[in-house]
């Protein structure tokens, strides 16, 4: 087995030998024109093999330093003498991009046989550490810290004085050369005294009721990575069914005041999901819901759990927060779509190999579709709110300028291209549209199946056939584009390959709204927002004038979104502009609404704006008044496939 120093000498000699011919060639180059040749890249990290790693890794995480927001980690790894490469997870499941937080790892010290073992970071892959295990050493210990951000500009906060989110995938190094499912780990964590913890992992023995150290069951590394933990001072644990639990941790105990009728809606959502798919791909399932103004918010799917970081009013302000509730159904659907059935190019043997995203319009798009449908079927939102949510998606793509040049398939690369960083012109650049435009495509497919089969079949049949096999199997079953087409043809024979290629692979300027019109509805605009729209404005802390002058504006007058070629954009307004005054009066949301209304009588919308250190007054040319999207039934007396889609299953 080659040592790190020997490898380094070999790499250097390879570079020298590799460039020697180039030096000879340069003698013929014109005077003053140096022309170096590219140095070869040497990959010394062993490829993963589907073989068991010898021994079990012990992983101990001390999560009690909440004052400094530091996770302190001790990892004990069985080894053999010789060269060893330890990897830190790079490509994170559910992120669709190489977003591993290697920059948050610090204080790495590796010891063995009572001595410190030097390590070197790989010069090509910075997520890999090389070390030479001395003779006679059969176990090494790695001590290091995971540093949770202490301000929002450092990244997502994982720890606060009252709660934490332990991402096991971010706390462990793993040996290269093996599939992660073949590496066994015995994890444990120590939580602050009095705190309640929740995870899909189960203790290996009796666990402390509140805080302290918990030794969890020994699991494969991929299972550990897929089983995050939440813990906090204020908690509420609510079983929804025999197999599914809602674990809630909040900033304050009063935020835990979920009414029984609201929890019952999520129980119904679980029941409707099982009726839809006809199976369960977990032995137990834990919703991990944190309600906080300080812990980083997110929605991230896992096979037997889901992380949901939401606002503190998720339950206590239920009637005015409809738009925030969908994340629960969406992430739950991922247990079937994305975790059990997984795109073939997305499944990888470890977290170093890149994950492909060519089928994200299934992975995320159909999950978005079913999440909204299940919300309606379970009554998590009213039918009117469900239709308004769909209307918002339809209006977004009916006015999206970027569809003129960028096909939907290209947006599946956006997690890597953009890393979800703020964009200057999102309406023109496009973003991860495989979510919501994918939802519209699957709605189109459902309505087409219903029409062609005269109501006998629907996308429900596809869901049961494609995701519903192998009840209680929580492994992974991969699929390709051809598998999706074959499953659709099994439900309803049609040229589904062409149907999908036209909507996904080609530039398609028109929004895919056939599922709405074929479903018996049409997209309309009125001057009154619905309750779903109001809840979204509330959660975003912004007024949304997208379909009138083309902007959304934060409460302080800062513009945080501008549509390409909209009246506001044509007046010179960009993201980052601050509106100081409206028609000579200091900015307020109500005054801007009134100015947009008055403009329908040919009164100009005059805005005093600030862009950096520059001030100016602009006029926005718009006479259409306030406009908010809704769906209107084409024939109120006729049956509708969209109504049938949103109806609960018996």
Image (tube, grey):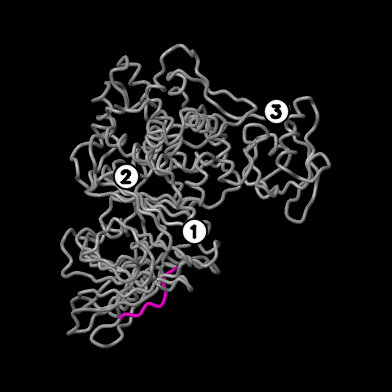
Examine the rendering and report whether any part of residue 77 can be seen: yes
Residue 252 is marked as: 1
Q: Is residue 601 magenta?
A: no
Q: Nearer the viewer, residue 362 or 581?
A: 581
Dominant SS in magenta: strand
Point 30% across, 28% down: residue: 460
- Residue at the limit of the structure toward the right, as seen here: 584
Contact, CB < 8 Å: mark 1 with mark 3? no
Looking at the rendered image, the quarter that the N terminus falls into is bottom left
Mark 2: secondary structure? loop
Residue 240 is marked as: 2
Q: Nearer the viewer, residue 138 or 273?
A: 273
From what the image shows, is residue 592 above or below residue 69? above
From what the image shows, is residue 76 above or below residue 263? below
Q: Is residue 108 magenta?
A: yes
Span colored in magenta: 104-110
Point 73% across, 43% down: residue: 588
- The residue at which mark 3 appears reads as 625
Point 41% across, 70% down: residue: 146
Left or right placement of residue 36 versus residue 199 in this view: right
Contact, CB < 8 Å: mark 2 with mark 3? no
Mark 2 Cα-neighbour bin, 10 Å: few <14, some 14–19, many ≥20: many
Marks 1/3: CA–CA distance: 42 Å
First in residue order: circle 2 vs circle 3? 2
Left or right placement of residue 462 versus residue 533 in this view: left
């Amino acid at each position: 087995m080659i040592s790190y120093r020997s490898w380094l000498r070999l790499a250097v000699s390879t570079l020298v030998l590799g460039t020697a011919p180039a030096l000879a060639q340069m003698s013929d180059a014109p005077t003053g024109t140096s022309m170096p040749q590219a140095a070869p890249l040497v990959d010394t990290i062993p490829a993963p093999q589907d073989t068991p790693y010898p021994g079990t890794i012990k992983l101990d995480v001390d999560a009690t330093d909440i004052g400094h927001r530091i996770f302190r980690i001790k990892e004990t790894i069985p080894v053999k003498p010789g060269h060893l490469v330890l990897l830190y997870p790079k490509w994170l499941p559910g992120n669709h991009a190489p977003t591993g937080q290697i920059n948050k790892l610090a204080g790495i010290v590796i010891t063995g046989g009572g001595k410190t073992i030097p390590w070197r970071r790989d010069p090509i892959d910075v997520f890999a550490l090389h070390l030479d295990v001395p003779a006679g050493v059969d176990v090494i210990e790695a001590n290091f810290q995971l540093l949770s951000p202490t301000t929002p500009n450092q990244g997502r906060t994982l720890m606060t004085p009252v709660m934490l989110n332990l991402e096991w995938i971010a706390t462990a190094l793993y040996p290269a050369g093996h599939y992660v499912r073949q590496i066994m780990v015995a994890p444990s964590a120590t939580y602050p005294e009095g705190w309640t913890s929740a995870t899909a992992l189960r203790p290996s023995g009796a666990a402390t009721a509140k805080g302290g150290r918990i030794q969890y069951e020994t699991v494969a590394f991929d299972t550990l990575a897929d089983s995050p933990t939440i813990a906090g001072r204020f908690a509420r644990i609510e079983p929804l069914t025999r197999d599914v639990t809602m674990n809630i941790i909040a900033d304050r105990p009063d935020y835990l005041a979920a009414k029984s009728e609201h929890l019952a809606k999520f129980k119904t959502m679980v029941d409707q999901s099982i009726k839809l798919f006809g199976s369960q791909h977990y032995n137990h399932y834990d919703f991990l819901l944190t309600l906080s103004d300080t812990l980083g918010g997110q929605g991230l799917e896992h096979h037997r759990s889901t992380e949901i970081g939401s606002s503190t009013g998720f339950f206590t302000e239920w009637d005015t927060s409809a738009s925030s509730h969908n994340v629960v159904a969406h992430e739950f659907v991922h247990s079937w779509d994305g975790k059990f059935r997984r795109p073939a190019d997305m499944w990888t043997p470890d977290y170093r190999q890149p994950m492909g995203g060519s089928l994200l319009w299934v992975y995320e798009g159909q999950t978005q579709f079913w999440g909204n449908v299940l919300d309606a079927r379970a009554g998590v939102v009213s039918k009117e709110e469900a239709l308004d949510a769909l209307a918002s998606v339809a209006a977004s793509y009916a006015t999206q300028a970027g569809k003129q040049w960028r096909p939907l398939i290209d947006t599946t690369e956006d997690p890597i291209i953009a890393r979800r960083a703020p964009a200057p012109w999102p309406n023109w650049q496009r973003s991860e549209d495989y979510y919501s435009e994918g939802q519209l495509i699957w709605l189109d497919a459902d309505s087409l199946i219903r029409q062609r089969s005269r109501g006998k079949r629907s996308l429900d049949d596809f869901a049961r056939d494609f995701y519903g096999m192998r009840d209680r199997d929580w492994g992974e079953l991969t699929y390709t584009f051809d598998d999706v087409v074959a499953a659709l043809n099994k439900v309803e024979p049609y040229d589904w390959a062409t149907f999908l290629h036209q909507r996904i692979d080609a530039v398609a300027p028109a929004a895919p709204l056939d599922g709405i019109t074929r479903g018996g509805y049409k997209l309309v605009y009125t001057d009154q927002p619905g309750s779903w729209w109001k809840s979204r404005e509330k959660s975003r802390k912004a007024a949304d004038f997208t379909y009138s002058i083309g902007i959304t504006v934060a409460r302080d007058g800062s513009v945080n979104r501008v549509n390409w070629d909209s009246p506001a954009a044509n007046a010179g307004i960009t993201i980052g502009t601050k509106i100081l005054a409206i028609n000579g009066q200091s900015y307020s949301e109500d005054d801007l609404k009134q100015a947009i209304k008055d403009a329908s009588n040919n009164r100009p919308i005059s805005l005093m704006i600030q862009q950096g250190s520059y001030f100016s007054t602009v006029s926005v040319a718009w006479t259409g008044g306030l406009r908010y999207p809704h769906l209107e039934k084409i024939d109120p007396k006729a049956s509708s496939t969209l109504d049938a889609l949103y109806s609960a299953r018996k």
